[in-house]
Image (cartoon, grey):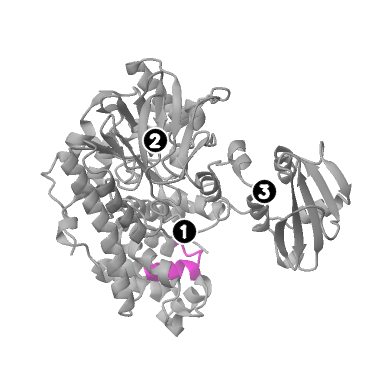
Amino acid sequence: MSTLPSFEDTTDFENADRGFIGALVPGVVKAADGRVVYDNDLYAFLEGDCPDTAHPSLWRQGQLCARQGLYEVTEGIYQVRGLDLSNMTIVEGERGIVVIDPLISAETAAAALALYREHRGDRPVTGLIYTHSHGDHFGGARGVLPHGTEEGVPILAPAGFMEHAVSENVYAGNAMGRRAGYMYGVMLPTSPAGQIGVGLGQATSTGAISLVPPTVDITETGQEETVDGVRIVFQLTPGTEAPAEMNFLFPDHRALCLAENATHNMHNVLTLRGAVVRDSRIWARYLDEAIEYFHGRYDVGFASHHWPTWGHDNVVRFLSEQRDLYAYMHDQTLRLLNDGLTGVEIAERIELPPGLQKSWHARGYYGSLSHNTKAIYQRYLGWYDGNPAHLWEHPPVELAVRYVDLAGGPAEALAKARTYIESGDLRFAATVLNHLVFADPENAEAKTALAGVYDTLGHGAENATWRNFYLTGAKELRDGPSSDVVDLSNPEMFMALTVPMLVDSIAIRVDGPRAWDEDITIDLVLIDENARHRLTLHNGALTHRTVAGEPRTPAGLTLTLTKARLLGVLAGKGLDGVVVDGDPELLARLFSYVTKPDPTFPIVTP
């Protein structure tokens, strides 16, 4: 049974407050049109005692993450925390400043930079570093490098950054975005009974997302670069918390940046919003490599979330425990998997060793031991647990109808669910009530009862993302899905997509059955890339390939254009400025099969 570390240990609070210089007052960031894109002041309630509607451990984490302002990490290195989900770090160079991870939105990044300049002077941005390929670490780039200011400024990123940065949300972007609303509690009120944070930070900003492409690739561990007189030594860590990620040392400052590979919580091996399963084995291995590779060369370790750790031995202890955390989850899941246990069974069996249970930074505020072990199982064996009964089960609605019938009908199912609520078995009560809602979505009593169960489960959850999922589910059962959708589109992001990725983004939206009988071939000749791409719609599948030289067979339509113009064509803006050879109606026919996904598709109802 998991036990909590000692609340008497205030080291994290001392470290979170150390080096404080000044805060943004009020702690609110607005867009040019006056819309609030981030409001850290909403979390002032966390200064009070933990209520019955929150897990004390998660409340503590919220108190730490809600601290906002400019902090000195060590001489010449500063962090702005509490103005977005992530931190922005600033390193002072000879002529200006090197910015590390410019948050999610241009507005929050600009506010963070202004806060730094208010206290440290109006120094120009002379370098930019992206630690890894997740949007909360590059989206605010234009807030620190507005258009026209990037020339001559080196922008460093790990090898593969661009491909992964722009592709993660392309293929499954609509489903990921919908589920991210649950994970981050976007539609919940910020209150002791509602959203109290995410564990990794407090919330995601909702401003303009941007991307300034890197100019310097970090391709190997040991690579050294000097930016504005600041020496940096890099360690590549691909396949850890992100497909493209890196740690790096500032040897002259004796400071180690740990990106998002080691933060003050258990991280996700698989996020609840959905993603490719991460490799916890490799994650542990790179943390071990960092311990040895940088040993003796730093006095402070800091990351792209949370607060720093000071003292070389303290950082080594922190990294060692983080290493052991991911290694233990991986190895014990594989041990039990090879004993024949399923992912669900492993999640119920596994527990962390006492040495990790008593470490606050190993608590599951963002990832959890339960869903991480299931993710490791998924990485190796996939969705199927080997039981033939689970090979061809009915889909949710059909399965629910049969379960409700088995229970004796809706009234009997509801009555039985309430007995499980009264006995404290909320997990099974949720299962029964979920079946009832899917079998009879107009059953108001069932929806109300299920919402109440979700409220209770959410208020008791130590994991912030579990809490947000439960409470958002309860809200949507009562009110239905919100029509508010966060716009994640940005021209710079789309320009960063390769042509094959752009075509893939169309292919995954083709209504295959309607297009079964079509046979369309379109060539795209990109002037600025000196390349020809052939698109073929056949048997309901849109495929593409790069054609070297003249094509062996003619296309029904050839479009000669720039990549920027291609974006306009794919957005349905017509063929002005495009050289057209062949039948332009083929393009209209192709687009007639392209669907638009529903960004508010149901989750807690059928």
Q: CA distance from mark 2 to mark 1?
A: 24 Å
Reading the image, the residue beneath label 2 is 84
Q: Based on the picture, tell me whether residue 434 belongs to the magenta stretch.
A: yes
Instruction: For marks 3 and 2, give the one nearer the viewer.
Output: 3
Residue 214, relative to residue 113: is it above or below? below
Of the residues under marks 3 and 1, which one precedes in the sequence? Answer: 1
Marks 3/2: CA–CA distance: 32 Å
- What secondary structure is marked by label 2? loop
Query: How many C-alpha atoms fall within 10 Å of the one at disc 3: few (<14), some, or many (≥20)?
Result: many
> Residue 499 has which mark?
3
Q: Is 84 positioned to the left or the right of 143 in the image?
A: left
Farthest residue to the top: give it. Answer: 121
Number of dots carrying numbers: 3
Q: Along the line of sight, which residue is nearer the eye, 454 or 576?
A: 576
Q: Give whichever of 156, 559 is nearer the camera.
A: 156
Residue 345: x and y, percent? Answer: 31, 73
Name the residue located 39 percent from the left edge and 50 percent from the top edge. 237
Q: Disc 3 vs disc 1: Cβ atoms closer than 8 Å?
A: no
- Tag 3: amino acid: Val
Q: Which mark lies nearer to you, 3 or 1? A: 3
Q: Which residues are magenta?
A: 431-444
Residue visible at 43% across and 51% down?
182
Toward which corner of the image does residue 83 lie, by quadrant?
A: top left
First reached walking from the N terminus: tag 2 or tag 1: 2
Left or right: 600 as drawn, with respect to 550: left
Q: Earlier in the sequence, mark 3 or mark 2?
A: 2
Please identify the quadrant where the N terminus is shown: bottom left
The disc labelled 2 sits on which kind of residue?
Asp
Disc 2 or disc 1, which is closer to the eye? 1
Q: Secondary structure at mark 3?
A: helix
